[in-house]
């Protein structure tokens, strides 16, 4: 986890050049502080610090960072500079403190000056931060003027990224601009010793945003306001209603997570059959009543980012089984806005709930709703009531999803609380836009040694998501002053993100200037590069990229790949044998089609009598057979995700999926943790590239299935076989290439059972494995890999000719 203040290097041996002014020895320093230093109470901190050290001068926000000029006794000046990093406010992240010394000018006081802007400079912007302990105390203090006020915040907490329209971060450039502060708020805002000094979203019940309740189904008029509205929502939720609740980065759909009927109704209305819902509880104490929480998990739950944390559920949990069907984990978060605290507070009455479902306010895979009118329209059939407010959300930002693996955070969806904080790279980057992948899209902009990964954009399968991508991109470009010189994109010609790149190229020089270069990056190369980049690895590695779908260099669908290479270049050493994907997309939605495809080449004596065949409509079975025989609409794939799908269906666990990865997830959930051995997977030797045959494994599985071996044991033996196979193949590659660093990436490695065992095999055999922590291993992390690959390709003159393609007008 990121510490609040990253210690930056501060010159310990600063040469101060004092001069005598009116007989007193004085020195003046000009200091530029870079990092997250705006919107976190940094200027008031500097103001107080300067006064403590009896220094005169000024401080201001600029597009470059916080700029300070101070003058006073040389010793006090030294102490002041050291204290900037030592005593920085809790939310500040100091990246760099630059100091230069100047002749004294005789400042008379210390003041906070108006912000300055410079076009090409940028600052880091704070993500949205959960309510701080001080504001929480005030929220429930009957004597405080913000008692039960749902928008209480201060310089240490509250909305940031989601309300910022431009930099520098000042109230007129946020969605708070429309609220005129009352005299009391104004006084706090201008008082340097106040916790709300220059807190841009500062507000109170007199002057700030309000909440109200609307029955969106019948009328859009408010029928309750303020605290009354919140009490009424609590009551309705306790009676089984579904409420749309406007949050920080978008709407949630909320219902009582312990009420089967409500959860089931929400699933029905949202057309979400099986995919897990996230839930929210008041505190860790409540969470521990239904989930196991380790110290590291507690820390993550309570962190200022307040992500959804995947936790192992307890057996006798009061949470409805429908919240996460066929899953032994629950996605849990703690409240992060004052409104959430008011919805969940313990009142010891019938409206108290242990946990609320808090799922994103959208229909299936559309972007999350953010505007009041938009929500009333789009969520009309989903919610019974709408808890609205009038603080506009400028930037859509879904909740982040994360987990603890081997004691460290391993993020699954990097969004609210994390974005737009950059991933810091160990090398300088050109200004690059990487467009990302199709599913779980995020884009990435780079500048200096920062990679600004966007918040979760979503599955780019509809125009709404594409337009969310485009507006998000414009916003990031503006905030971080990036004008891309290079555009990186996936090879897949049908990805919307790739088509976006193609359109940029067609519109060409008009929009971008003439110097822009376009670099296609193979999907699995991008996965591996992403893992290398976040781990600071630049030398060649063995890259194991296991996922569902990625466009290969040979035009086939890859996804079970062992690559060797670095950022510049890769070679495919080993891959799973190609099998047919009968019906294309249909085979992804219906894992039983994959099972049939795999079984097709096995002896009939082995496959006859499998229950799989009795579960499938004979007509459909015939169609699939014909598709395979005639190679009709059946592309080839080496996907590892599809192998997991096929096994899941073969074992009768999941024949048809309703969300991405379902068959594999349910297969993992059933795997018996106590089983150590696995099926023997023979590895062919010979000249690279080698294709690994999956048939022996499937044969063994069928034998066990027919012998009545429990599914949990078969699943475990399958997982163990894959883990063993990965390390076996890595040994083969090491013999030839002499590499011992292994980067694991791709959505298949979200499978904890598999990841744990793969790592242990690799370590035992002397490999140095790298996995993802800060960036998702799934397609949400692709953009970072695209950016670093493109950066190297355009800067290496030798490779440039060969690998920098011109987009051939795809789409
Ligand atoms: Zn606060
Ligand atoms: Zn006020």
Image (cartoon, rainbow, N blue to C red):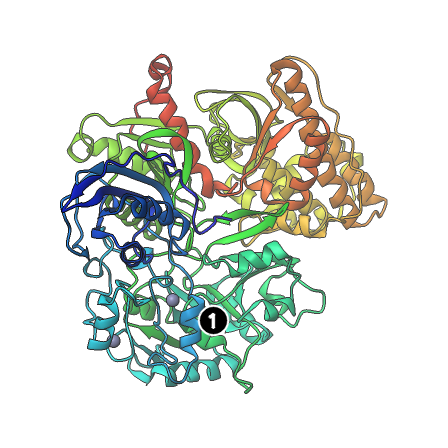
SS category of the residue bearing label 1: strand
> In the rendered view, would you say 287 is above or below 743?
below
- Could you tell me which residue is drawn at 30 percent across and 54 percent down? 53
Quadrant assignment for the C terminus? top left
- Is 508 on the left or on the right of 541, as rendered? left
- Could you tell me which residue is drawn at 17 percent across and 56 percent down? 109
Residue 695: where, in percent of width, then height? 71, 31
The single residue placed furthest to the right in the displayed view is 707
User: In this rendering, does residue 613 appear at all?
Assistant: yes
Q: Nearer the viewer, residue 803 or 657?
A: 803
Residue 295: where, in percent of width, then height? 62, 57
- Could you tell me which residue is drawn at 35 percent across and 72 percent down? 152
- Is 113 on the left or on the right of 517, as rendered? left
State the count of labels: 1
The image quadrant that residue 482 belongs to is top left
User: In this rendering, does residue 490 appear at all?
Assistant: no
Residue 582: where, in percent of width, then height? 56, 38
- Ligand 2 is found in the corner quadrant, namely bottom left
- Is 209 on the left or on the right of 762, as rendered? left
The single residue placed furthest to the front in the displayed view is 23
Residue topped by disc 1 = 254
């Amino acid at each position: 986890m990121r510490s609040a203040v990253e210690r930056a290097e501060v010159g310990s041996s600063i040469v101060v050049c004092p001069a005598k002014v009116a007989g007193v020895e004085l020195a003046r320093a000009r200091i530029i502080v870079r990092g997250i230093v705006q919107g976190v109470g940094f200027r008031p901190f500097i103001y107080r610090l300067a006064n403590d050290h009896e220094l005169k001068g000024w401080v201001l926000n600029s597009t470059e960072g916080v700029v300070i000029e101070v003058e006073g006794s040389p010793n006090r000046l030294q102490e002041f500079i050291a204290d900037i990093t030592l005593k920085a406010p809790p939310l500040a992240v100091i990246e760099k403190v630059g100091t230069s010394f100047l002749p004294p000018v005789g400042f008379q006081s210390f003041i906070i000056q108006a912000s300055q802007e410079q076009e090409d400079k940028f600052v880091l912007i704070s993500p949205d931060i959960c309510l701080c302990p001080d504001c929480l105390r005030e929220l429930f203090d009957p004597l405080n003027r913000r008692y039960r006020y749902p928008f209480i915040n201060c310089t240490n907490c509250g909305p940031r990224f989601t309300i910022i329209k431009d930099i520098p971060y000042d109230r007129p450039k946020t969605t708070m601009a429309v609220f005129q502060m009352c005299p009391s708020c104004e006084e706090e805002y201008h008082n340097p010793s106040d916790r709300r000094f220059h807190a841009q979203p500062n507000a109170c019940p007199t002057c700030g945003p309000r909440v109200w309740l609307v029955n969106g189904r019948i009328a859009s008029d408010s029928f309750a306001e303020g605290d009354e509205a919140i009490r009424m929502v609590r009551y309705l939720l306790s009676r089984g209603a579904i409420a749309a609740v406007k949050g920080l980065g978008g709407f949630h759909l909320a219902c009582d997570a312990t009420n089967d009927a409500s959860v089931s109704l929400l699933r029905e209305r949202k057309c979400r059959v099986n995919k897990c819902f996230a839930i929210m509880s008041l505190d860790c104490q409540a969470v521990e009543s239904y989930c196991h929480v380790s110290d590291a998990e507690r820390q993550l739950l309570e962190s200022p980012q307040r992500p959804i944390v995947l936790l192992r559920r307890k057996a006798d949990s009061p949470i409805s089984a429908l919240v996460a069907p066929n899953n032994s984990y629950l996605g849990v978060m703690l409240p992060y806005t004052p409104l959430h605290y008011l919805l969940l507070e313990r009142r010891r009455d019938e409206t108290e709930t242990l946990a609320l479902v808090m799922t994103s306010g959208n229909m299936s895979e559309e972007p999350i709703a953010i505007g009041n009118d938009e929500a009333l329209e789009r969520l009309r059939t989903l919610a019974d009531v709408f808890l609205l407010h009038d603080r506009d959300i400028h930037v859509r930002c879904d909740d982040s999803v994360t987990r603890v693996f081997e004691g460290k955070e391993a993020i699954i969806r990097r969004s609210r609380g994390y974005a737009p904080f950059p991933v810091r790279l160990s090398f300088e980057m050109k200004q690059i836009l990487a467009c990302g992948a199709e599913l779980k899209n995020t884009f990435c902009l780079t500048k200096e040694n920062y990679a600004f990964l966007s918040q979760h954009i979503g599955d780019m399968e509809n125009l709404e998501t594409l337009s969310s991508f485009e507006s998000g991109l414009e916003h990031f470009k503006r905030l971080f002053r990036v004008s891309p010189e290079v555009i990186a994109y996936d090879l897949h010609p049908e990805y919307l993100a790739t088509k976006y790149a193609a359109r940029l190229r067609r519109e060409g020089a008009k929009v971008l200037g003439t110097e822009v270069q376009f670099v296609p990056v193979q999907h699995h190369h991008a996965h591996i590069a992403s893992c290398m980049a976040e781990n600071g690895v630049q030398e060649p590695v063995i890259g194991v990229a296991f996922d569902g779908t990625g466009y290969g260099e040979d035009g086939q669908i890859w996804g079970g790949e062992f690559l060797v290479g670095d950022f510049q270049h890769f070679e495919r050493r080993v891959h799973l044998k190609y099998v047919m994907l009968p019906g294309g997309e249909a085979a992804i939605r219906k894992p039983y089609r994959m099972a049939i495809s795999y079984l097709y080449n096995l002896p009939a004596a082995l496959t006859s009598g499998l229950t799989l065949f009795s579960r499938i409509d004979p007509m459909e079975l015939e169609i699939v057979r014909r598709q395979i025989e005639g190679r009709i609409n059946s592309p080839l794939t080496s996907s590892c995700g599809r192998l997991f799908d096929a096994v899941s269906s073969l074992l009768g666990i999941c024949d048809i999926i309703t969300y991405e990865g379902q068959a594999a997830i349910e297969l993992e959930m059933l795997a018996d943790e106590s089983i150590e051995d696995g099926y023997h997977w023979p590895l062919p030797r010979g000249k690279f590239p080698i294709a690994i045959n999956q048939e022996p494994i499937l044969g063994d599985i069928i034998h066990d299935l027919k012998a009545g071996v429990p599914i949990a044991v078969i699943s475990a033996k399958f997982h163990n076989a894959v883990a063993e196979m990965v390390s076996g193949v890595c040994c083969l590659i090491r013999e030839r290439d002499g590499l011992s660093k292994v980067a694991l990436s791709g959505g298949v490695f979200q499978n904890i059972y598999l990841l744990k065992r793969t790592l242990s095999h690799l370590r035992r055999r002397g490999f140095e494995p790298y996995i993802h922590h800060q960036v998702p291993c799934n397609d949400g992390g692709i953009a970072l890999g695209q950016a670093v690959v493109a950066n190297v390709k355009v800067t290496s003159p030798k490779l440039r000719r060969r690998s920098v393609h011109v987009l051939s007008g795809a789409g």
